[in-house]
Amino acid sequence: MVLVIFSEIFDFFIDKMVKFYYNSIRFMSKNLTTIEK
């Protein structure tokens, strides 16, 4: 039971991290392309 809860929380955090990471990467690349132009 505890493992299930833990995995749920873990999945939640992984999802948040991935989205945050992806958004920051996209933001960075967008800025880089803007600077290059």
Image (spheres, rainbow, N blue to C red):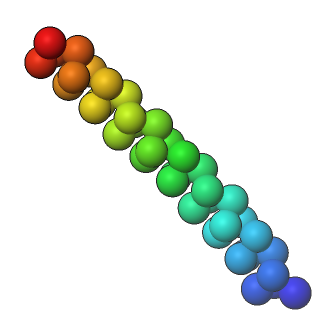
State the residue at coordinates (65%, 69%): 10
Q: In the image, is 32 to the left or to the right of 21?
A: left
State the residue at coordinates (38%, 35%): 26
Of residue 29 and residue 12, the one placed in the foreground of this image is 29
Q: Residue furthest right?
A: 1
Of residue 21 and residue 5, the one placed in the foreground of this image is 21
State the residue at coordinates (31%, 25%): 30
Q: In the image, is 7 to the left or to the right of 37?
A: right
Residue 7, how many percent across, how many down?
71, 76
Residue 35, how many percent across, how many down?
16, 15
Of residue 27 and residue 3, the one placed in the foreground of this image is 27
Residue 21, how many percent across, how many down?
43, 46
Residue 20, how many percent across, how many down?
50, 42
Q: In the image, is 25 to the left or to the right of 35?
A: right
State the residue at coordinates (27%, 21%): 31
Q: Residue furthest front?
A: 37
Viewport quadrant of the C terminus: top left
Q: In the image, is 4 to the left or to the right of 31?
A: right
- 8 over 19 or under it: above or below: below
Viewport quadrant of the N terminus: bottom right
- 18 over 37 or under it: above or below: below
